[in-house]
């Protein structure tokens, strides 16, 4: 495989904070790599340097293979607010337009990409778009040139689950080379075959998916600790020798002395495994939470229906996931529950003991010039922990990985993930007993998400979550509210993965029924044609023959029967491959083999499906 990217000795610091120093790595053609690191340690900075948006401190070198096309998807895109969706993608296409393509071919390619990403209102301006729509436009602008190398910073943020699954499947099948930062563990596990971990300024590479990374990372840390323990034991012996060493020291003694200082440095190294400590008291919660009776909400301006005739009594301790496409009313629904919006029909009753902790997708409007400690002290000076003790907010900040040196840092200096972590802190420090979380996983690193998940699993209060993170939903939610559009909300008992399998089975059944109906209709048409030929006159027979479908030849009939068997077998194989790919138990070789095979299966399904339709229409 050709080397697509060579990175040598690049560094980045902000003030006294060193993100990484003289790191080097290589990416080959076909590699699909995820970059994992805690928030604020340099993930986005590293991607920006690679994409040419920023530069390395103190030299270093970034070399891409000549003549390959590169696309960069930033966390937040900066499009002209007055441009239309079509303009943005067309301008991205013009930057590398193929000279041999005709104008109509260019237009076809643009419309094809926009259609696949469900951006049908191409005249809509950027300033009118939702966060999810802007992200889809950015992805369209990235994909339009069919790049050889993709660099993506949190590609799943703001996307609905359907779009995430489309992007996941497309990247799995694509032969492109990929480097991305993502917190979506299912997405990471199914798309990537390598992981680079940026930890305390150093890089560690793992040749496998996320499940493999977790296993090998634990081994690395255990080995490091064991080696450190051995070095400390040996240091005691060498320290005793140093103390007894006479003043006159020969060459051998000098060598041993140098080795002693190297050993001393090695023995002093530690791995600071910092993790979020969520340990807050929950206010007392009564039996009544939120009771909804025939609740509806319609926007007066355009008649859009967000919620229609919804009735449900929320129970203490239940954990509900909310899923649906962008723009179907999920955030509107949360605002109705908390009282920020009043229903246009029906009624909502809230329990007297309910204390909402509402984590909004938009976040909190921090004053960028405020310090971390200043922003928190505006809410409270102390926080009550789970054991009933009160601690000052300075101590509570430490629990959320804001050590004393960061207390007086201005909020504008924080990374996106650090700002979201600070926002989460301000929500929890109010000791809520009903948590409403609207896209809580955006911008949080994976290690923080793991801690948040464990906290929510054991949280005795009620939890209502809107999330596009399938792993997060599977781990937390007991059942789901499925927003189907036009205000319809369906209750599904089970996990998100269970719901997706249910929908796949339902779709497979629908396709099977359509094939059976088409076969039945074809046989009926053939019988009707035969009757018409037998009973009609020669002239009438000729007229009917012009109108009816011709009869399949023996060879075509056998081909149709075989196609039906093949399609059924391929559907079963695809389902089995999807299951093993999401299991996290495959070796690197088996994972690569399965990923390659599922792409071939999908292509074969498309090809055989089209041929089946051709023969069915004869």
Image (cartoon, rainbow, N blue to C red):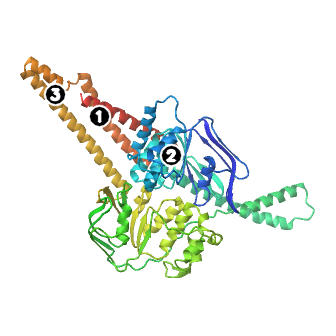
Residue found farthest to the front: 82
Q: CA distance from mark 1 to mark 3?
A: 22 Å
SS for callout 1: helix
SS for callout 2: loop
Judging depth in this view, the residue of 604 and 293 nearest the camera is: 293
Circle 3 crowding by C-alpha within 10 Å: few under 14, some 14–19, many from 20:
some
Q: CA distance from mark 2 to mark 1?
A: 31 Å
The image shows residue 483, relative to residue 607, as above or below, that is below
N-terminal-most mark, 2 or 3: 3
Q: Is residue 170 left or right of residue 63?
A: left
**Quadrant for the N terminus in the image:** top right
- The numbered dot on residue 587 is 2
Residue name at image x 52 percent, y 35 percent: 97
Of badges 2 and 3, the one in the foreground is: 3
Judging depth in this view, the residue of 490 and 298 nearest the camera is: 298
Residue found farthest to the bottom: 389
Question: Quadrant of the rendered structure where residue 353 is?
Answer: bottom left
């Amino acid at each position: 495989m050709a080397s697509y990217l060579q990175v040598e000795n690049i560094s980045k610091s902000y003030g006294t904070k060193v993100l990484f120093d003289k790191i080097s790595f290589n990416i080959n053609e076909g590699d699909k790599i995820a970059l994992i690191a805690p928030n604020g340690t340099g993930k986005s900075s590293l991607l920006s340097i690679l994409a040419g948006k920023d530069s390395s401190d103190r030299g270093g070198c970034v070399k891409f293979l000549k003549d390959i096309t590169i696309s960069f998807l930033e966390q937040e895109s900066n499009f002209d607010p007055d441009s239309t969706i079509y303009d943005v993608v067309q301008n991205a296409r013009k930057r590398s337009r193929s000279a041999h393509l005709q104008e109509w071919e260019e237009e076809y390619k643009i419309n094809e990409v926009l259609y696949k990403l469900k951006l049908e209102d191409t005249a809509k301006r950027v300033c009118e778009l939702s966060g999810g729509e802007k992200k889809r436009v950015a992805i369209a602008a990235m994909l339009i040139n069919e790049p050889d190398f993709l660099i993506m910073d949190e590609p799943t943020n703001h996307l609905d689950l359907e779009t995430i699954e489309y992007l996941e499947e497309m990247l799995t099948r694509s032969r492109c080379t990929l480097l991305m930062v993502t917190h979506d563990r299912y997405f990471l596990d199914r798309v990537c075959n390598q992981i680079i971990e940026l930890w305390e300024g150093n890089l560690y590479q793992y040749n496998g998916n996320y499940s493999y990374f977790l296993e090998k990372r634990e081994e690395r840390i255990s080995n490091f600790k064991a080696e450190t323990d051995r070095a400390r034991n040996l240091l005691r012996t060498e320290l005793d020798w140093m103390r007894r060493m006479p003043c006159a020291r020969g060459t051998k003694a000098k060598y041993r002395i140098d080795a002693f200082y190297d050993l001393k440095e090695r023995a002093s190294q530690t791995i600071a495994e910092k993790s979020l400590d969520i340990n807050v008291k929950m206010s007392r919660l009564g039996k009544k939470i939120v009771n909804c009776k025939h609740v509806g909400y319609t926007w007066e301006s355009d008649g859009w229906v967000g919620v229609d005739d919804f009735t449900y009594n929320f129970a203490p301790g239940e954990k509900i996931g909310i899923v649906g496409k962008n723009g179907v009313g999920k955030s509107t629904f949360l605002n109705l529950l908390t009282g920020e919006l009043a229903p246009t029909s029906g009624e909502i009753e809230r329990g007297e003991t309910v204390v909402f902790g509402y984590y909004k997708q938009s976040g909190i409007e921090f004053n960028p010039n405020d310090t971390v400690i200043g922003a928190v002290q505006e809410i409270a000076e102390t926080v009550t922990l789970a054991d009933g003790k009160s601690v000052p907010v300075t101590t509570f900040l430490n629990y959320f990985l804001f050590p004393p040196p960061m207390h007086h840092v201005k909020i504008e200096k924080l990374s996106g993930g650090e700002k979201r972590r600070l926002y989460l802190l301000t929500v929890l420090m109010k000791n809520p007993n009903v948590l409403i979380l609207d896209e809580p996983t955006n911008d949080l690193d994976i290690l923080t998400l793991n801690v948040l998940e464990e906290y929510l699993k054991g949280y005795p209060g009620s939890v209502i979550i809107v999330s596009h993170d399938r792993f997060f939903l599977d781990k937390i939610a007991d059942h789901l509210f499925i927003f189907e559009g036009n205000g319809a909300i369906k209750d599904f008992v089970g996990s998100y993965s269970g719901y997706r399998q249910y929908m796949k089975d339902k779709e497979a059944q629908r396709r099977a029924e359509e094939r059976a109906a088409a076969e039945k209709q074809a046989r009926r048409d053939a019988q009707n044609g035969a009757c018409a030929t037998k009973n009609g006159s020669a002239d009438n027979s000729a007229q009917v023959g012009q109108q009816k479908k011709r009869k399949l030849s023996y060879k075509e009939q056998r081909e149709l029967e075989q196609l039906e068997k093949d399609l059924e077998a391929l559907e079963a194989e695809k389902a089995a491959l999807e299951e093993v790919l999401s299991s996290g138990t495959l070796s690197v070789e088996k994972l690569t083999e399965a990923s390659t095979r599922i792409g071939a299966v999908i292509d074969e399904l498309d090809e055989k499906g089209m041929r089946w339709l051709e023969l069915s229409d004869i």
